Image (cartoon, rainbow, N blue to C red):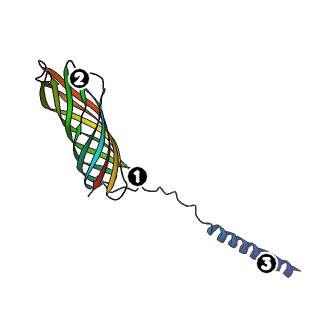
């Protein structure tokens, strides 16, 4: 009888040990929870030179009136970008034409050819480049009165911001806003006239990177 009891106890202990081992193996075989993974931002390749053209809509004012002098225009632009990670920086120049004009006090003033040289600093967000730009601007201003015409070159400051995205490896599209303030100039017409010019401008452009 004693041998039977000892045998049953030994069998029970062995079965328990076998079950515990199987449970431990099952626990070890449970896969670990996946680690959270942040998808990295896919930066574009903005480094290099580029050229492009843009249609512009300008609403400005001569002297100190309201921004009621509206006109469509166009421009050509070009520049060079450098890129470090998501940071994009470089320089850009443009030249364009806008026929904004205004008549006040018997003097008609008109803006013609204009251009700027600016720095650009932007952040490559993956799908698009968001940038700010600022620099110096110049414009050809003309005044007419009593059959006389006087033309002056005016310098100014310009600043703005824009968004640009690549639609192919080399072609980009952009939208940009800029504000430009030109200096006052004295025109020898109508007994003498002093006029300044400042404008808001919206630019929609297509560029090619090379």
Check whether the beta carbons of the residues at disc 3 and disc 2 lie within 8 A of each other: no
Q: According to the image, label 3 marks what residue?
A: 11
Q: Quick one: SS at disc 3? A: helix
Which of the two discs, 3 and 2, sits closer to the camera? 2
Q: Nearer the viewer, mark 1 or mark 2?
A: 2
Q: Name the residue located 12 percent from the left edge and 19 percent from the top edge.
A: 192
- Indicate the quadrant containing the N terminus: top left, top right, bottom left or bottom right: bottom right
Rendering quarter of residue 106 = top left
- Residue 175 image-quadrant placement: top left
Percent across and percent down for residue 72 are: 29, 37
Q: Position of residue 204 (x, y in %)?
A: 33, 43
**In front: 29, or 178?**
178
Front-most of residues 36 and 70: 70
Helix or strand or loop: what does disc 2 sit on? strand
Q: Disc 3 versus disc 2: distance between alpha carbons?
A: 112 Å
| Residue 127: numbered disc | 1
Sequence-first disc among 1 and 3:
3
Q: Is residue 187 above or below residue 87?
A: above
Q: CA distance from mark 1 to mark 3?
A: 69 Å
Q: Nearer the viewer, residue 3 or 167?
A: 167
Q: Is residue 202 above or below residue 60?
A: below
- Earlier-in-chain disc, 3 versus 2: 3
> Mark 2 — residue?
103
């Amino acid at each position: 009888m004693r041998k039977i009891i000892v045998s049953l106890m030994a069998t029970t202990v062995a079965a328990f040990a076998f079950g515990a081992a199987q449970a431990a193996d099952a626990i070890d075989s449970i896969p670990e929870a996946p680690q959270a993974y942040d998808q990295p931002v896919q930066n574009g390749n903005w480094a290099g030179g580029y050229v492009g053209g843009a249609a512009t809509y300008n609403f400005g004012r001569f002297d100190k009136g309201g921004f009621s002098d509206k006109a469509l225009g166009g421009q050509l632009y070009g520049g060079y970008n450098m890129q470090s990670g998501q940071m994009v920086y470089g320089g850009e120049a443009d030249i364009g034409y806008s026929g904004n004009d205004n008549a006040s006090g018997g003097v008609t003033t008109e803006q013609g050819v204009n251009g700027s040289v600016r720095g650009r600093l932007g952040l490559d967000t993956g799908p698009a480049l968001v940038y700010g730009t600022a620099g110096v601007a110049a414009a050809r201003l003309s005044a007419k009165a009593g059959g006389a015409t006087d033309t002056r070159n005016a310098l100014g400051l310009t600043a703005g911001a824009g968004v640009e995205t690549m639609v192919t490896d080399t072609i980009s599209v952009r939208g940009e806003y800029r504000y430009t303030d030109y200096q006052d100039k004295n025109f020898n017409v109508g007994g003498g006239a002093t006029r300044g010019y400042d404008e808001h401008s919206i630019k929609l452009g297509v560029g090619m990177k090379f």
